[in-house]
Image (cartoon, rainbow, N blue to C red):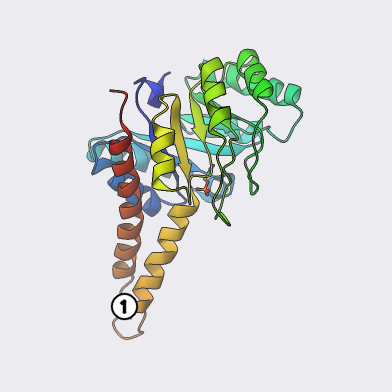
Amino acid sequence: MNKYLNQSSKQYFAFNIWSIESAKAVIDGCANYGNDALLQTSMKAYGKLDKKELRQFVTSYSAKRGIKGYLHLDHCKEMSAIKEAIDFGWDSVMIDASDRPLYQNIEQTNHVVDYAHERGVLVEAEIGQINGETGVASYEDVCLFAEQTDVDLLAVAIGTAHGLYHGTPILDFDLLERVIGSVQTPLVIHGGTGLEDDVFLKLLRYEQVKKINISTDVKMSYREAIRKAMEDELFQIEGFDPLKVVDYIQTEIRTMVEYKQELLKRGIVHE
Ligand code: 13P
């Protein structure tokens, strides 16, 4: 049941993937540091993926690399998709009812928790919206939510946002510390792309911060790889080799993942 929360001190960067290839690059990056891999599927990617194939690949390739590979369903609002992901062997699911009034968020989360826990699956929920806009959750709401639900992971809005930041985000560390002082639930930070290294290291100093989500950076690595491949004239018709382009993509994503593993190593102060 504890899945990737089984070691109290373990912290993760969770990377969004959209294909077997992107999953492989992330697993390689984590495995090169001896860390388990936490892979997330957005609802958009989840809808397009062959779930059985991805599950089998993540399990078998991670085992081959000597680590565990976990699958997480990111930002889901539909119970049917949550049930399906659980059936396909996803290790954790996120019920995102953060756009609903608090009591509805609590109600829906509890519904998912009941279903998922019976099947040994972890549940993440969100409080305060973390979409394209930076914003912060209400401390009182977070406390009430944690008290009235049995979620395994709680994404609390502290000023991060999904996507690329325009300017430097200001994170509400006071709120984070107040929450940590009152609530035991492991915490998740969304919107990891674009945060400075010292911000990551500061976040990782809090043992209760278990998971930091990275999505845009994975996509940007993919984009950068193609840009480099074009710059290196790999797209000439004569002698075009898709395998070389794939190599660029794998290397770029893996290097970004490794950089984050390096931060994890530097951030470990709890062991
Ligand atoms: P970024 O796209 O900003 O990295 O955010 C990822 C995320 O939080 C996914 O849930």
Q: Residue at x 52, y 17 (%)?
A: 181
Location of residue 27 in the rendering, given as x and y in whole percent from the top left corner: 32, 44
Q: Which of 231 and 18 is in front in this view?
A: 231
The C terminus lies in which quarter of the figure? top left
Badge 1 amino acid = Asp
Quick check: 33 left or right of 77?
A: left
**Which residue does the numbered mark 1 point to in the structure image?**
232
Q: Is residue 9 above or below residue 148?
A: below
Say which of 224 and 202 sits in front: 202
- The quarter holding residue 10 reads top left
Q: Residue 193: percent from the left, percent from the top?
A: 48, 49
Secondary structure under tag 1 reads loop
Q: Residues within 10 Å of mark 1 (few under 14, many from 20)?
A: few
Residue drawn 29% across the image and 63% down it? 247
- Drawn side of residue 105 relative to residue 83, left or right: right
Reply above or below: 42 against 114: below
Residue 42 found in image quarter: top right
Residue 221 point in image, percent of width and height? 41, 59
Using the image as rendered, state which of residue 257 and residue 44 is in the foreground.
Answer: 257
